[in-house]
Image (cartoon, rainbow, N blue to C red):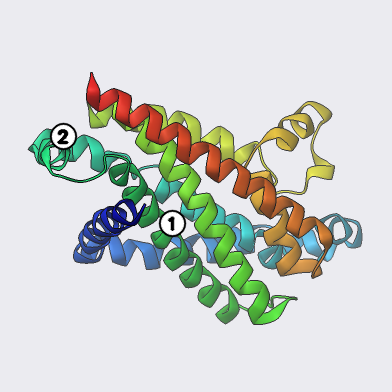
Amino acid sequence: MKYLLEDTYYVALRELKKYFRQKTRLLMTLIQPFIWLTLMGNMMTGLTNNPIAANFLGTGNYLTFMTPGIILMTIMFTSIFSGMSIVWDRRIGYLDKLLAAPINRAAIPFGKMLSAAIQGVIQAGIIVVIAVILGVRFQTGILGILVIFIIAMMVAFILGGISLALAAKIKTIETLMAIVNMLTMPLMFASNALFPTNVMPSWLKAIVKINPITYAINPMRSLTVTGWSSSIIANILIIFAIDILVMLWTNWVFVNAVSE
């Protein structure tokens, strides 16, 4: 176990060094959430002037309502593409070097998933700062924001794992991008990230209830809009269970794929 943790740390460290060396990517990490918050956050401003609509949202500020959704959207669009590092490492021959090295093979997917999770927290932090500047107030304060960061890390870990499992089987970046794009949009728009569930048709409500993203949005929104509740712990436990399952599944897929 000690060596697995050490190997995971070094794989994650390499991925994070690559992340921080990519200046354009870092710049986009700042610009993208700012654009989404300013444009999408103000798109429905008139909606909250209606008392009925404001009641559905749970707040008189649509930007406050959608901030958790923007956090999840940003994390999703970043973490779900983390599998491309496997395809790229395979293309340049680095993956073969890793597999030949005296390290635990499970450390390769685990390290990359850990890197995705840390990047998710960084992006969540940036969005929270921008949201506060734009006037969003978190009902649960600093402690609630820290819990939001934990949820963000857990979700990024899950999405990174799914992406890595797909990348272990797929040989080209183009194919991986096509599949990832096909998965990302339904996951986001079939959730309550941008709109409240109670205004959706019944068939969509049923899909939203089984969408794993919903279990991350719900506690984030409670921490942002309404305050502490027992459902927050229940949702976090569900996300944690999904984390464990995805971690085991990703490792199984990766180890089998590289052994073929």
Query: How far across and down, in percent of the image, does residue 87 sit?
Result: 22, 35
Judge whether 57 appears above or below 167 on screen.
Answer: below
Residue 190 in sight here: yes
Please state which amino acid type lies under the numbered disc 2. Arg
Upstream in sequence: badge 2 or badge 1: 2
Is residue 156 rendered to the left or right of residue 210?
left
To which residue does mark 2 refer?
A: 90
Q: Secondary structure at mark 1?
A: helix
Which is more toward the observer, 69 or 218? 218
- The single residue placed furthest to the top in the displayed view is 260
Say which residue appears at 18% left-offset and 39% top-offset: 88
Q: Residue at x 27, y 61 (%)?
A: 16
Residue 255, placed above or below residue 221: above
Crowd rating for badge 2 (residues with CA inside 10 Å; few <14, some 14–19, many 20+)? some
* 101 displayed left or right of 232: left
In the rendered view, would you say 3 is above or below 208?
below
* Element class at badge 2: helix
Residue 117 is labelled as 1
Q: Position of residue 256 (x, y in %)?
A: 31, 24
* Mark count: 2
Residue at (75% x, 76% y) in the render: 139
